Image: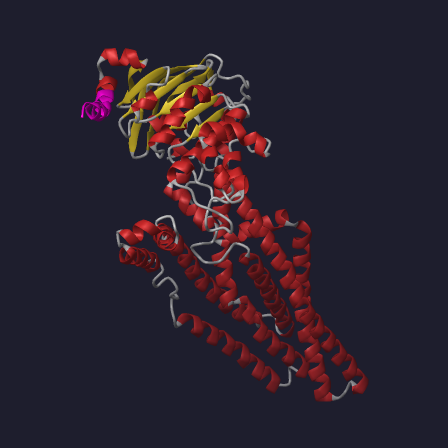
Amino acid sequence: MAGLTGTEVTPGRRASGVLEVIRLLPRVSLPLTVALTAVVLLQALLSSGFMLAGAAVVADVASRAAGDAGLALDLAVFIAVFVARLALTPVLGMISGELARRLNATLGQTTLEGALRPVGIGHLSDPAIADRIQLAQGLATGYPPGDAVTSLARLASSRLNGLAAAILLATVEWWLPLPLAAAWITLSRWRLREVRKAVDAEEESMPALRQAAYARDLAIGDAAAKEVRVFGFQDWLHDRFTRAWLAGMDALAGSGRLPSRVAGPALLALSHAAVFAYLAFAVSGGRLGVEPITVALQAIAAMGALGWIGDIQWMLAQASAAVPHALAVGRLGVEAELSRPGTTAPDERLPAQEIRFEDVRFGYPDRPVLKGLDLSIPAGSSLAIVGMNGAGKSTLIKLLARLYDPVSGRITVDGVDLRTLDPLAWRRQLAIVFQDFVRYELSLRDNVGFGRLDADRSNGAFDRAAKLSGLNDFLPRLPAGWDTPLSRRFEGGTDLSGGQWQRVALARALFAVEHGARVLVLDEPTANLDVRAEAQIYEHFLEITRGLTTILVSHRFATVRLADRICVIDGGEVIEYGSHEELMALDGRYAHLFTLQSAPFREARHV
C-alpha cells in the first residue's frame, strides 16, 4: 500500500505514550502546564510538611516540654498544612481537567488533519491505517487520551510524595528507605510490564473489534435496516458481532497475570520486616525519640506511593496508548508532501487543448486495473466511456481527480503533468457526479452548495442548477424549500427517492459548473432515474455540457451516443475510440454491446 497511499504509518518500535503526553502538554498550553507542575511540586512539599508537623505535635503531646504555647503553634502549623493540602486537590483536578480537554481537542484535530492531508484516498482503505485511526481515539482501551493528563498529574503527585517520604526516612537513618524503595519500585515495574502487555493485546485485537463495530452499526443503524429484516439475518448479525467481539477479547485473556503471585508480597514483607526490626531495636535502645519514630512511621506508610498505584497507573497506560497512534496518523502525507515537486495553481481556463492519459498503469493491492492506457480528451468536447464492470472506468475518473496517482505513465492537461498542478486548485476545475455519490443528511441547500462552498448561497444562485438537473420537479413540495433537511431523522426533514437523490447529486455538480468548473464528469448519471426523468436529462444534455470538457460513464447507450466521442475500455486498455457512427461501422465490441442493449426495444416495436 505504500505506493498507493503515500503514507508513512508503518509498524515499528512503540513510542512511549506517557513521554509523548509529557512532550505535548507544553504545546497544548504552556501556562496550564507550568501551573500544573507548580501545584504538583507544592503538594509534595506540603506532604513533607504535613509529616513533620504531625511528628512535632505528637512529640509535644508526649513530652509536654514545649508548653502550651509550643503545642498550639505546632498544632496551628499542622492544621494550616492540612487545609492547604485539601485546597490544592480540587485545583489540581481543575487544571488537569482543562489540560485533558485541550489535549483531546488537539489530538482529535491532529488525527483529522492527518486523515485529510494526503492528496489521494488510498490510505483510508488501508487496514493498518484504519486500525490506527480507531486506536488514536482510544476505542481499543476505552479511555480517551485526555484521561492520561489527569492520571499523570495524580501519579506525579504520588511519586513526589513517596520521594519526599523516602528523604524524610533517610534523615532518621540513611539506609532505611533503600530496601523499601527497591521493593515498591520492583513490584511496580512488574505490574507495569503486565499492563503494557494488556495494551499490546488490545491493539492487536483492533481488527476483530472493528469487525464487531461494523456488525453492531449494521444492526442498530438505518442504512441496512430494511435488508436486515427482509432477509431475516438479525440472528446472524448478533452472532457475527458476538464472535468478533469475543475474538477480540480472547487476545486479552490472561494478560493481567503477575510474573509471580508470591514474589511481590514476599519482597515487600521482607523489606518492611527489616526496617521495622531496626526501628524496634533503636527505640528500645533509646537511640530514637518520639518525633523521629513518628516521622519514620509516617514515611514508611507514605513510601507506598513509589509502588504500583492501581487505577491511576492503569488509566495512564491505557489512555496514553492512544497518543502515539494519533501523532502517527497526524503525520500522514507529510513526507510525501515534502518530497513532492513544487506545484502550481492551474490556469482557470484549463483545459484549453486536451486532457491526455499517456501509458497510464494503475492497480489496487488486490488487482491490476489499467495496463498502459492511452486516451485523449479534446477540450470542450464530450467523451463517453463504456466497458464491462471492472474494466477501470471509475478508476480512470479517480485518477483524473488525483484521488490516486498512476503507478507509471502520466496524465497531462494541455501538456502539463497533473502531478505538478496544485490538487485543490485543479479540483475546483472539476464537477463530478460519482456513481456512489454521498447522500448528506443535511439541507438541500447544503447538498447542492457543496459543489462550491465559497459561492453565493441565495436561492438565485441555485436556479440554473435546479432547472437543468430536474430539482424543480419536487423542490416546491419540500416543506422548507432549499432549507429542508434531507433526512427524516431531523425535525421537519424528509427523505428522497433514489432518482431524486441522483438529481441532487447532478445539481451539486452543475452548481460547481455555474461557478467556474470546466470539466464535468458524470459516472452513471441516470442509473436511478425513471424513463421520463432520463428523457429530460437527454433533452438538456447539450445545454448541460455546452462549452465544457465532459466525460460520461454509462451503461445506457441511449446516453452514450449523445457524446462527441466514445471509447471502449477492456483489459485496462482502450480498444475502440471514435464517434457512435464510426464505432457502429467498425462492427466491434461497441457495436455488439449497442445491438445487444437495443434489441429488446426493436422487438417491442414489432410486437
Residue 60 shows in the view = yes
Majority secondary structure in the magenta region: helix
Quarter-of-image position of residue 70: bottom right
Instruction: State the image coordinates of residue 20 (x, y, percent, origin top left).
Output: 54, 49
Q: Eyeballing the image, is 599 above or below 177?
A: above
Relative side of 108 to 570, left or right: right
Q: How far across and down, in percent of the image, does residue 302 sit?
A: 58, 72
Outermost residue toward the right?
69
Q: Could you tell me residue 287's position as x and y percent?
A: 64, 82
Q: Nearer the viewer, residue 600 or 238?
A: 600
Query: Residue 596 magenta-drawn?
Result: yes
Query: Residue 487: where, in percent of width, then height?
Result: 46, 47
- Seen from the viewer's position, the closer of residues 127 and 305 is 127
For residue 336, say whether it is visible: no
Span shown in magenta: 593-607
In the figure, is residue 259 to the left or right of 233? right
Residue furthest to the front in view is 607
Residue 261 among those drawn in magenta: no
Quadrant containing the C terminus is top left
Picture colour scheme:
secondary structure
Q: Residue at 36% x, 18% y: name it.
A: 562
Above/below status of 457 relative to 304: above
Residue nearest the observer in this picture, 415 or 98? 415
Q: Is residue 482 above or below residue 573?
A: below
Give the quarter of the image for residue 565: top left
Residue shown at 59% from the left, 66% from the top: 158
Q: Quadrant of the N terminus?
A: top left
At x 35%, y 54%, the residue is: 219
Q: How many marks?
A: 0
Residue 553 vertical placement versus 118 (above, below): above
